[in-house]
Amino acid sequence: MQTILEKLNIKSVNFGTSTGLNAWSSGEELLASFSPVDNQLIAEVTKTTFQDYQQVVEKANDAFKTWRNIPAPRRGEIVRQMGMAFREYKSELGKLVSYEMGKSLQEGLGEVQEIIDICDFAVGLSRQLYGLTMHSERPAHRMYEQYHPLGIVGIISAFNFPVAVWSWNAMLAWVCGDVCIWKPSEKTPLTAIACQHIITSVLKENDIPEGVSNIITGDYQVGEWLTSDTRVPLISATGSTRMGKIVGATVAARMGKSLLELGGNNAIIITENADLNIAIPAVVFGAVGTAGQRCTSTRRLIIHESIYESVKERLIKAYQQLRIGNPLDENNHVGPLIDTKAVEAYTKAVEAVYQEGGKMLVDAEVLSGEGYESGCYVKPCIAEVKPDFRIVKHETFAPILYLMSYSTIEEAIDIQNDVPQGLSSSIFTLNMREAEMFLSVNGSDCGIASVNIGTSGAEIGGAFGGEKETGGGRESGSDAWKAYMRRQTNTINYGKELPLAQGIKFNL
Ligand code: NAD
């Protein structure tokens, strides 16, 4: 498991000792990274001190002065090289993601592929940072808009996508001319350090100041230094709604910009016109993939009453086939939760289901015994509930699937929308009216709404994010890049008169 760290010549982490320092920190306090797979201490990372943080910001600010003057397509060329470097390390980094976070090897590799994909996207984007040209109402005037970089972008990321979400932000920010300070989750610092090393080597080879890419390690307090710092014009924060409310308020209080990517409570509607041969696997992958720890995990299933029993039976059967165990073993479908705290949240949610009158169709269980020694493995479960249960409106980051039935499509859409979160949603139907209604103004209120695919597994080409308590931010594809730049409207008078807008007369 140390291969990528060795290959990258990372001396900044200690393997089981407590004395080393990392390149970004002079502190002595250590952050331990335990794998949920087998509870092994993978390494310890030095926490960033406040003093280090000040140096990082200064270094980033200096680097910005150089970086913003490099033409965008040239910045794109550097990002292209970063994409090539991630191709080289895909296998090792994917493995480390899987081991440190606990997701399956396939999903770990998928995360690195997302980095590669967004690099490719960003390279093209570096020649397409377009502004509009407008017709001025004044003669001999020209009006246009242009986009300039913001400066330092602070990236706060969650444990469940330890590297992909960072890259969605960083690659776009870099082609836009910004520099980045990344605070990864304290639960997954090693994958972040591995990425930082890959980036640093590309910057060095190109003689670019290393302050273009910075990393600070630690818990929420280190995050707070970033969010309250007026030198950081944009904070992009991914994580829980609880965190987002604090971060959003702190950044707004200093008139900074925030891009928030928070919790989801994603539903699939299965109508009587669905092709169940694609709906069932989509539900199972969405509900149990990453052990239910994706922001887009399928948490609620809203099924037409006429097919409710048959969907239920097929799901119960499918859940019986699930193999739970070490995620690096490709025969397993479900790996561990991130830590024992997450297991507690799972157990509490199951208790809440019973308390509110729900019924378990596939029982919940915390697994023990050989292979499950970390105490982080749980059985994916299915509960039969009512849409108004309090627990159903809450995002529990674990593989718990709630089943509900409906009779009209309007009712199904109401149930789907009646939660505080608004990230991802889908409908399975072969009926055009139902599909179009779901996508219409009267349909899903989520940032992502799909037909005949599950709720999880976004492509980088679309703008990613959600409404309501999901935070309203958009990252990755489409025109999400605009969040990383400041727009400037320019008016140029090339005439000999000074006509005023709106025909206002001012005679001297
Ligand atoms: P979390 O909120 O506990 O932590 C996320 C990050 O925020 C960590 O780096 C943490 O140190 C930092 N943080 C926490 N409090 C902070 C504060 N007051 N100031 C500054 N930084 C602070 O979330 P988590 O448990 O790591 O991740 C799971 C959550 O993330 C889920 O709710 C999931 O839905 C959400 N998520 C959302 C998206 C999305 O794109 N919408 C993507 C991935 C994860």
Image (cartoon, rainbow, N blue to C red):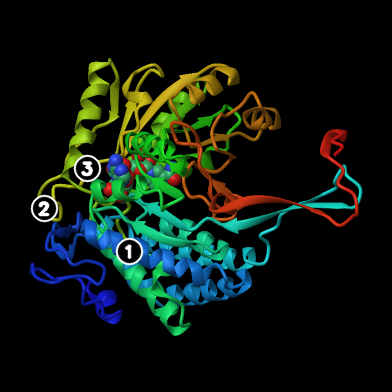
Taking the spot 43% from the left edge, 37% from the top edge, the residue there is 252
Locate residue 468 relative to residue 410 in the image: left or right.
left
Taking the spot 13% from the left edge, 52% from the top edge, the residue there is 374
Some atom of ligand 1 lies within 8 Å of the CB belonging to the residue at label 3: no
Residue identifier under label 1: 56
The amino acid beneath tag 3 is Val
Locate residue 488 relative to residue 346 in the image: left or right.
right
Label 1 SS: helix
Observer-nearest of 198 and 39: 198
Q: Residue 95: x, y in percent? A: 31, 67
Residue 128 picture quarter: bottom right
Asked if marks 2 and 1 touch (Cβ < 8 Å), the reply is no
Name the mark nearer the viewer: 1 or 3: 1
Label 2 SS: loop
Q: Residue 380: x, y in percent? A: 29, 40
Q: CA distance from mark 2 to mark 3?
A: 12 Å
Mark 2 or mark 3, earlier in chain: 2
The amino acid beneath tag 2 is Glu
User: In which quadrant will I find the N terminus?
Assistant: bottom left
Taking the spot 40% from the left edge, 29% from the top edge, the residue there is 312
Taking the spot 37% from the left edge, 53% from the top edge, the residue there is 161
Q: Quadrant of ligand 1?
A: top left
Residue identifier under label 3: 378
Q: In the drawing, what numbered circle is on residue 4? A: none
Label 3 SS: loop
Name the mark nearer the viewer: 2 or 1: 1
The amino acid beneath tag 1 is Val
Q: In the drawing, what numbered circle is on residue 373? A: 2
One can see residue 458 in this view: yes
